[in-house]
Image: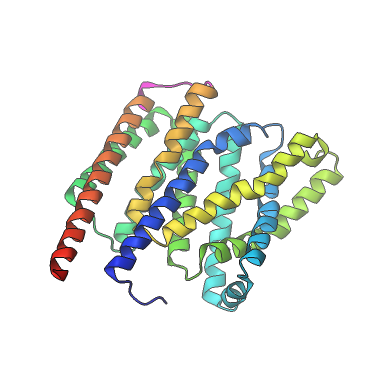
Amino acid sequence: MHAPFTPAETARRHRAGLFYGLGAYLLWGVLPLYFKALAHVGATEIVAHRIVWSLVFLGALLTFAARWRPVGVALRTPRVVLTLAASAVLIGTNWLIWVWAVNNGHVLEGSLGYYLNPLVNVLMGTILLKEKLSRPQLGAVMLAAAGVAVLAWGASSGLWISLSLAATFATYGLLRKVVDVEALEGLSIETAMLTPLALGWIIWMNQSGGGGLSFDGTTTALLIAAGAVTAIPLLLFTAAARRLPYSLLGFLQYIAPSMQFLFAVLVFGEKLTTAHIICFGAIWTALAIFSLDTWRRSAVGRRTAAEGLA
């Protein structure tokens, strides 16, 4: 385990975590556009390609960064292997539900799932990790919860999509936060665990004549590029999860579903209801309250530390 970080080291880790988190969620926000371009390929096959080509991409990164040795260390630790096996199942399930939702006209329900996810993150962070929320932050959580409740009531037919996405990704993030393995090594092991099944599916689909690799050059290129498209934001996310309080990481995630929400309405033509408008306003108000209070508390902490050194 790592030794406790100094206040200066903690501040640097938090700044880096913030940039990693923003990068991850901005990339996830535009993913619906990518998967819409693959709507003619089945969701299961898209996910299979995401897994296989992610492993190729990650293997190249491990080689370039000379990071294979930590992978071997992790694989010799039973607790790490078991935790990563569980997180691999969770992220694979999350990918499958999300791609299916995007390619079947349920981007709004998908965005609701990722609106719900930060609330689950906050709940896990406060109950399981004993993280503390201030009164303004608690009020922000309650306001966001009220907005999501309105949206859930107005989109009940697709609520299973939303709840499944929220539960799988929140639990995945929690497991990746507590397991003692870095982002690149952990994601590589998870992907390797899923690869045999994914590769078998791709081979079977192409032998049956219906595989995406047999469609056209553009489809093939998009399927292969899905490896990098999948791995890069996940690497950024897992790096952020190890550096930020889990409750703050959860609120950053409102960036991605807000972008997905806008794509669903403005680009894909999905129906916008009053419930969506209420939820959207409540969540961004909650995010502003939470962020301002976090900034204020951080500024007070820095000022107190500076006065102690004076």
Q: Residue at x 60, y 31 (%)?
A: 104
Q: Is residue 270 visible?
A: no
Tell me where residue 126 appears, x and y as whole percent. 29, 58
Lateral position of residue 95 relative to residue 146, left or right: right
Lateral position of residue 151 relative to residue 41, left or right: left
Answer whether residue 187 is magenta in the image. Answer: no
Out of 156 and 225, give the one closest to the viewer. 225
Q: Residue at x 57, y 28 (%)?
A: 105
Q: From this view, report whether residue 220 is shown above or below residue 185.
A: above
Tell me where residue 98 appears, x and y as whole percent. 56, 41
Q: Write down the region rendered in magenta.
A: 269-275
Lateral position of residue 100 relative to residue 144, left or right: right
Viewport quadrant of the N terminus: bottom left
Viewport quadrant of the C terminus: bottom left
Q: From this view, report whether residue 189 is shown above or below residue 197.
A: below
Tell me where residue 70 appears, x and y as whole percent. 58, 74
